[in-house]
Image (cartoon, rainbow, N blue to C red):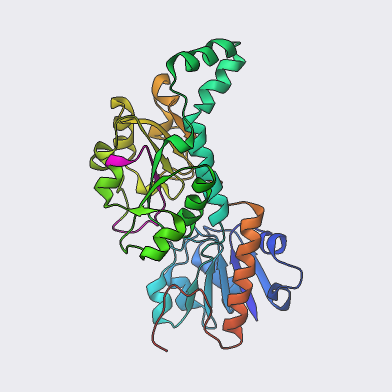
Amino acid sequence: MKVLHIGKQGNMETYSAKDSFLYELETVDMPKGLPVREYLDKAGDADFIVADAIAAVPGDLIRGMKNLKLIHSEGVAFNSFDIETAREQKVYVCNSRGMNASAVAEQTILLMSGMLKNIIENDQAVRRGEQIQVKEGYMKRGDLKELSDCKIGLVGFGDIAKKVARLLLAYGVSSIYYYKRNVLSPGEEKEYHVQYLPLEELLKNSDIVSLHLPVNSSTEGMADARFFSLMKAGSFFVNTSRGELVDDEALIDALKTGRVSMAGLDTLDHEPVQKDHPLLDLPEDLAGRLIFSPHIGGITASSFRRSYAMIWEDIRDAAEGRRPARVVNPWEE
């Protein structure tokens, strides 16, 4: 049996355990973004595809691979996979849900804390030789906060947000709100020490708002002008999910008006990000109120090792005629 890997070459060998199902398969390792014909010429007879979470797996490729049984995302996302064609062809699509939950939760806390402590400006102040002036300024104003001083709203409450909630508890945060379409049971709310609020109420009551949602037709651009207008004046905004969730111009306006004090962003729309991105072309006073990281929240080595353990488990199941555990395009069998 054969697997086509579409993504960063070498990932399969780097992150797979030595006793994994990988070593029972013939493998073809190819970069993402090639024409469909190139994939078909080299691996058209493959039984499985393992693809980078943002790689395109189009219908033409799926239809052209007559032995194909399963397509697996290397990560959690799969919105560039043609899951409807896969369903029509009775090809399983799976993702590695939860593989990076701990890592992205850590990145979320990093950005929250980094904003509260104004880490970029403070770093620059020390480098300018202004350490004592900045320190005394904070002491005089009394405006340096801890996470436990904040009410925190989590928009979306999946695997990552649940990890974030647990970490916030360790920091002594007592007011954690969440919003999702299907409200948790009272028992689950008690387990995570969270309180449900409708989205508008969450935005009005939270000192920090953090996005934890997938991108789809109902969430794309949801952090728009109205969204930011509902946030508490001077509050903080975090996005470790997907850049497409945020209207960049609306965020810029919210920073200009002070509705948003700072934003911590692990991801931006239109990745890979270029120098002409609107959030990178701001006056100095606004630029200093943004903390960026290069979409690294979910790419720790441990995350990929967890992902590949899931991938080989699902592929082995499909190879042996069982329904994989992580199917995202179910059909009646």
Residue furthest toward the right?
18
Left or right side of 10 for 322: left
Classify the position of the N terminus by image quarter: bottom right
The correct choice, above or below, for 198 with respect to 309 in the image is above
User: Residue 289's quadrant in the figure?
Assistant: top left
Magenta span of residues? 204-218
Q: Nearer the viewer, residue 262 or 135?
A: 135
Q: Residue at x 60, y 16 (%)?
A: 126
Q: Position of residue 191 (x, y in %)?
A: 46, 60
User: Residue 288's quadrant in the figure?
Assistant: top left
Q: Nearer the viewer, residue 205 or 63?
A: 205
Q: Position of residue 12 (x, y in %)?
A: 67, 64
Q: Decide whether the magenta segment is chiefly helix, strand or loop.
A: loop
The correct choice, above or below, for 70 with respect to 277 in the image is below
Q: Is residue 324 visible?
A: yes
The correct choice, above or below, for 105 with respect to 5 in the image is above
